[in-house]
Amino acid sequence: MISRRSALTGLLMGGAGLAAAGVLSSRDARHWLFGATAFAASPKPLAIPEIIAGEVRDGVRTYALGLQKGISQFFNGVETPTLGINGAYLGPTLKMRAGELVRMNVTNRIGEPSTLHWHGFHLPASADGGPHQVIADGATWSPQFTVKQRASMFWYHSHMVPRTGPQVYQGLAGLIYVDDDETARLDLPSDYGVDDIPLVLQDRAFDSNGSLIYSTSMPSVMMGMRGNVLLVNGTVRPYFEARTSKLRLRILNGSNARFHTIGFADRRTFQQIGTDGGLLERPFETSRITLAPAERTQIVVDLDDGRPALLRTFATPNTGMMGGGGMMGGMMERMMGDDLSFDVLDIRPGAQRGKSAGLPDRLVSLDRPDPSRAVGTRRFVLQMGMGGMMMGGGSFTINGKAMDMNRIDEAVRVGTTEIWQIENASMMSHPFHIHDVQFRVLDRNGAPPAPGEMGLKDTVVVAPSERVRLLLSFADYSDPDSPYMYHCHILEHEDAGMMGQFLVTA
């Protein structure tokens, strides 16, 4: 492993010097230096994804989803080729209830193979939608499974290795709302599109003709693909006319690589009520939340004062090169755009706002994580071959191995609970995602998790030199042939090999 300073020097040369050397095309260099042409974008009402409940047929709630090509207008008068699900960009929000049997009829019409992964769901491996469940162009895939989730917001997206990055970047993603009886008893804002608002945050880069830029250059693979325009549900510069005194915002970091630190411009506090896989036991008051790619949160903001509220993302120092620090760290952040701030949503309280109920002191009951239940501990070390990167090669590995579709890395027994210890031996923070399970964070370098991390999670950030222990249980499903995945959710790292496979066996 080369030194941090050497790697930073190499990366800085990569961004500025490789273009001059002809290694990067002018198109790639333009993205790398954030010099893409700016387009006019007038403020627009926030696009709210259509919510669909499917059709119940013989006791099965059935959804029809079509992966398709489209044309989107993110900027005034500018047409951008995109991908979408039942539309030009992104997909509908799927509404379902815990305990239901659901069937997904997914037809692929994008001109290349793809998959559709139900991110955060506990379900049979053959229905997971990972890289083994490929849908050929023109084909239909129809997985069926029981909804075993607690109420929360989940999502679905392409998982077509090594094409996950570009396919999600172009628009193959959507949201899932799961309801249950426990949450229905709470008087939380729950009128979709009125006081219960989904927000999908995605940073994108655009060429001078309006096309999305997806760079495969060394820096973009190394750091993950990032852009200098923020789309919120596919909207640039959105606003929302609030008709209630409280808003529940369900936020997904749908970016390929960028971390988003969210809060309000006036530093007003809000209540965090949920994490990836469900509600917290109690609301938690804060003014900032950092979300890595694939992480979700639910917050409630109070608009009783009638003042406009600008939701923003703020610079997230050192998410690309954690611990870089000093002049080089600052240069690296500027190069990769990690010093950028984005306006997310201009919330405009209406003059006549309906009164909202106060939040309960207690939301749901969660079992206290009990490490003594674990039958053992598995260790996963995230690594990046920096030296190879400088020579145009490099590697992204877990436990020293890059992803191999024909190799099973781990096998666990159904009905058991384990501790998974995730260690980061690289220079970057990585969001680590595990398929099939919602886990609990036990500790970070021996310290308890923060209050906002004490709920159910399927993605966890691991900083450089950090050790995070997770408690996870494997229930209900076993399959000797179909594996689940675990991987970094920086999509370019996932596609480049920072992923492994595990079987749940009887």
Image (cartoon, helix red, strand yellow):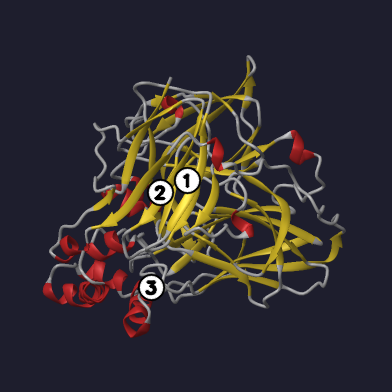
Residue designated by label 1: 173
Where's residue 229, x and y in %?
A: 45, 68
The amino acid sitting under disc 1 is Ala
Tell me if I can see residue 345 in this picture: yes
Q: CA distance from mark 1 to mark 2?
A: 6 Å
In this rendering, position of residue 192 left or right of residue 291: right
Residue at the far front in the pictured view: 372
Dot 1: element: strand
The amino acid sitting under disc 2 is Val
Q: Quadrant of the N terminus?
A: bottom left
Q: CA distance from mark 2 to mark 3?
A: 29 Å
Q: Quadrant of the C terminus?
A: top left
Q: Specify the label residue 117 is tagged with.
A: none
Dot 3: element: loop
- Identity of the residue drawn at 32% across and 44% down: 499
Q: Specify the label residue 323 is tagged with.
A: 3
Q: Pointer 1 and pointer 2: residues touching (CB < 8 Å)? A: yes
Where's residue 103, x and y in %?
A: 54, 24
For residue 284, what is the image quadrant?
Answer: bottom right
> Is tag 3's residue or tag 1's residue first in the polypeptide sequence?
1
- How many numbered callouts? 3
Dot 2: element: helix
Residue designated by label 2: 168
Relative vertical location of residue 3 with respect to residue 490 in this rendering, above or below: below
> Is tag 2's residue or tag 3's residue first in the polypeptide sequence?
2
Tell me if I can see residue 171 in this picture: no
